[in-house]
Amino acid sequence: MQKRKAVPEGWLLGRWCRFLKHGDHPWQGLILLMSALTLMLMLAIGWMLWSESSGARLEFGWGFLSTAAKPSWDPVNDEFQAWPFVYGTLLTSLVAILLALPISVGIAVFLAELCPPWLLTPLNWLMELLAAIPSVVNGLWGVFVFLPLVVAPVGIFLGETLGKMPLIGGLFLGPIPASGASRLAAGMVLAIMIIPTIAAVTRDVFLAIPDSQREASLALGATKWETIWQVQIPYGLSGILGAVILGLGRALGETMAVTMVIGNNSGGGLSLLRPGYTMASIIANEFAEAVTKLHSQALIEIGFVLFIMTLLLNTIARLLVWRVARRTPHETRA
Amino acid sequence: MSQFSFLLERGHTSRWQFRKIVNSLMLSLTGLQTLLALIPLFWIVGYVILRGGKSINLDFFINNPKPLGEAGGGVLSAIEGTLIVTLLAALFAIPPGVLAAFYAARHPNTPLGVALRFSTDVLSGVPSIVIGLFGYALIVKPQGHYSALAGGISLAIIMLPIIIRTTEEMLKLVPPTLREGSLALGAPEWKTSLSVLFPAALNGIITGFLLGIARAAGETAPLLFTALGNERFDLRMIVCSGLKSHQNIFQIVGRLLEQPIDSLPLTLWQYAQQPYPERVEQSWAVALVLMILVLVINIFTRLCIEARARRLRG
């Protein structure tokens, strides 16, 4: 008591410091604020796209996305229907997943189960490098090298075989343009780009599977492959599904490479072998030169739909991957 | 009976042989698939090096683009632009990212902590073109003109989740005894975080920054409607004229940031679409520079992480 009266300033400072917990309250507040800002960023993106596209939403309503006949995209007459672009996005992503999934699972099995340790680090690196190549470089290589050398011959072959079949012929209606620029090209380039993502997540899923599962199966006399195919893949199935959805999300939103190889032409009908648009590529192509206000609003609305699609897919994927990771320790204990 | 058991035995061995064949077949198939996936990597890298190497020279780095149709010229404006926009993005993304990572590492199980990790995961999956639209709506539209500032902020949103994630992982790797020791000595939480945890994790955190920068440097889509591209961007001229008219540094930086700006990926995209062969050749050279930039940063950071992991283990 005596001391405090002797130095009142120090006493006040002490009170103040204790009130702030020696700086901990401001610090907690600061890191809390930054976390909250990061959270708000998601909401802000959604809200911004929603409010900026209000005019287009009022004008077209749900018809904007309807699959009904004669979809038109006519900036001059302010007629906008987005279904062809949604279709292009879904089709190219589906092709990419179908091509990438078997290869990625194979890679994941190799990396997690078979690879000799000295090869593991270089291979993991190379996979990460493949993921790190800028999308626009992929696109450039796609346009000038991959399309004429690989996609065009494959497209001609598909058009001549599957294109002649009764039910699915419409999907493979040729001829593919000489340059190879088509939805098929976009799907194949996308597959190259999402393989590292799917492979890496699937590898982690395999690594998270407890050894007891492997050992039990091997002890029953199963071969290594049977263990992988009948025990590990079913065990990690939801995780693998998560990886696929994650890859799908990546494929839906990929812009530059797709814009460069898809041909950017809305007259392609349903065929895989014809040029088309995806949602991302129409935005990349037209937004900077949008003619009217409604035009740019329609493009922002496409962006909003894309945002919601990837948001949903990513949420589902993360939940699935988390579930495998969370389930595993309990089962090892038991 | 002995006959039957003989048959059974034979059937069993052939079945077993079949299973063994399937086993080795499928296992070697996984190896082949790994090779197959690596073909595009080597193909892309090799082709870009060969073709880009042909048209790369000193001119390419020190000159601004020549008018269309003329040979020669360089992409100095794009190199400067990439540096400026990426640095700007790092400035915007790193401080909030690191602070948010402190929160995520300190309170992993609070609702906000879980929500934060979840939203960084989701944010890293938002298409870059959507982020470009957001940057346009947030900054370009109210301001009324395209600008380097808008480009920097858009790229910062791309970098943010990468920085939060890696910083959080690295902070978690710091042994808890360090933190407890500091707290036991009476240091408050903030001082423990900043002068004990942060330096201990700094190497790893910097690799996270570099990964984020490499990712942002290669992005095109967020810049399409924010930085737009500007072949006549001239850093030297802006700085010199600014100095001549006695502007202070803030005014000069302000002038740099308020106009549209070029970047390497944007230049690549624009050149690749042009019908002039010399521009296409230059776009390969740009691809080479961009790829080297991104791959070198990636390889370097992997080496650092590898070395660090080995040190922590051993």
Image (cartoon, rainbow, N blue to C red):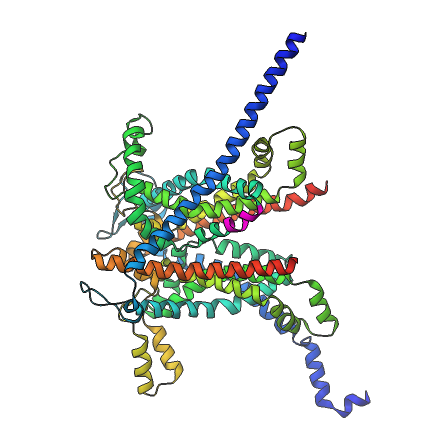
Residue A299 location, quadrant: bottom left
Q: Residue furthest left?
A: B69
Q: Is residue B39 magenta?
A: no
Q: Residue at x 29, y 54 (%)?
A: A285
As for residue A119 lying within the magenta part, the answer is yes
Name the residue at the right extreme. A2
Looking at the rendered image, the quarter that the N terminus of chain B falls into is top right
Compare residues A269 and A16 and report the one nearer the observer. Answer: A269
Percent across and percent down for residue A119 are 53, 47
The quadrant in which the C terminus of chain B is found is bottom right
Residue at left 59%, top 66%? A32
Q: Principal SS element in the magenta part? A: helix
The answer to whether B238 appears left or right of B305 in the picture is: left
Q: Quadrant of residue B72?
A: bottom left
Viewer-nearest residue: B134 or B313: B313
Residue B238 % position (x, y): 31, 78
Horizontal and vertical percent position of residue A297? 33, 56
Of residue A289 and residue A127, the one placed in the foreground of this image is: A127
Q: Can I make out residue A44 in this image?
A: no
Looking at the image, residue A127 lies above or below residue A37: above
Q: Residue furthest bottom?
A: A6
Q: Quadrant of residue A30?
A: bottom right
Q: Which residues are magenta?
A: A117-124
